[in-house]
């Protein structure tokens, strides 16, 4: 099912032995438009933000706004520190995934390495790495390419450039809760079309300029104007043909999807 990034905000992440914290953001892969990590605020018990990979998810309860993961609080406490205010490097990803004994999603043939979905991919380490266990340093992994992971929150607000001019800015995302791919961007066009938000496929994005804070899409301004108007209380269904990315259409009300009214 398609859900908004807004649905994730304040969702609780639970370890096998208690709560970890609440989701504040997510990092996505700008090559495949897939959420690779959730940024979780641990509150008072750890007093820092940590990354949680969808590869560790055991079950999701959207109506109760809770996600259970196959980790202990002690594992999270001892996990590698990552500065969640900066893009995550491939070196830090390797340290993180190696710590939990999880596969490198970029090493396999499918979206999540050995599989198309991160859910139920397998067990992680039953115990945290013991004191004195030597993990490779970032410097030792420096031959690995730096990545393409970006904060969803930081990219929200980026201006959208059609192939014939500016048209709006990114206001939200719609993601597939099975594969965790960002399928659509919600574009706020109010500077051009007062009060209107539209939905376009992430497949139309040609590139994102981090320096300019702009997303360039291979669509005309008119095509974006004619895209489906976004209403978060309506279901988004998809149509496509072999010549173009999926196009969204909105159908019946779906307030029940999150239990919010």
Image (spheres, rainbow, N blue to C red):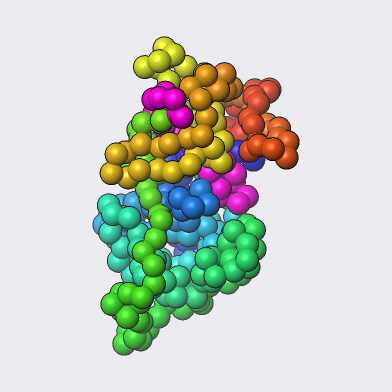
Residue 52 seen in this snapshot: yes
Q: Where's residue 231, x and y in %?
A: 55, 22
Magenta span main SS: strand
Residue at coordinates 49% horizontally, 52% vertically from top-left?
A: 31
Left or right: 85, with 178 as reference point: left
Q: Where's residue 235, x and y in %?
A: 64, 28
Furthest toward the right, the residue is 241
Q: Is residue 167 magenta?
A: yes
Residue numbers of the magenta segment = 162-184
Is 103 placed above or below 225 here?
below
Q: Where's residue 258, x and y in %?
A: 57, 35
Left or right: 191, with 238 as reference point: left
Query: Which of the 4 image quadrants contains residue 98?
Result: bottom left
Residue 25 seen in this snapshot: no
Q: Nearer the viewer, residue 186 or 22?
A: 186
Is 237 placed above or below 146 here?
above
Q: Nearer the viewer, residue 210 or 163?
A: 163
Q: Nearer the viewer, residue 130 or 153?
A: 153
Q: Is residue 112 magenta?
A: no
Image quadrant containing the C terminus: top right
Is 96 placed above or below 148 here?
below
């Amino acid at each position: 099912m398609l859900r908004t990034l807004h649905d994730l905000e304040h969702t609780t992440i639970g370890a096998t032995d208690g709560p970890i914290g609440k989701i504040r953001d997510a990092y996505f892969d700008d090559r495949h438009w897939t959420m690779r990590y959730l940024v979780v605020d641990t509150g008072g018990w750890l007093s820092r933000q940590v990354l949680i990979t969808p590869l560790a998810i055991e079950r999701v309860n959207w109506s109760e706004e809770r996600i259970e993961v196959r980790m202990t609080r002690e594992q999270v406490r001892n996990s590698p520190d990552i500065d969640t205010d900066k893009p995550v490097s491939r070196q830090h990803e390797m340290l993180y995934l190696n710590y939990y004994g999880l596969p490198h999603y970029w090493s396999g043939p499918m979206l999540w390495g050995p599989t198309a979905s991160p859910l139920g991919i397998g067990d992680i380490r039953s115990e945290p790495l013991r004191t004195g266990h030597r993990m490779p340093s970032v410097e030792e992994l420096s031959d690995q390419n730096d990545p393409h992971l970006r904060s969803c929150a930081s990219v929200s607000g980026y201006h959208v450039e059609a192939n014939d001019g500016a048209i709006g800015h990114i206001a939200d995302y719609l993601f597939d809760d099975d594969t965790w791919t960002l399928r659509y961007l919600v574009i706020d066009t109010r500077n051009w079309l007062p009060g209107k938000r539209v939905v376009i496929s992430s497949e139309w994005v040609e590139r994102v300029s981090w320096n300019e804070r702009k997303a360039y899409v291979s669509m005309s301004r008119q095509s974006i104007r004619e895209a489906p108007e976004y209403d978060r209380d309506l279901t988004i269904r998809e149509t496509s043909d072999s010549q173009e990315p999926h196009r969204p259409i909105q159908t019946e009300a779906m307030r029940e999807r999150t239990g919010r009214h």
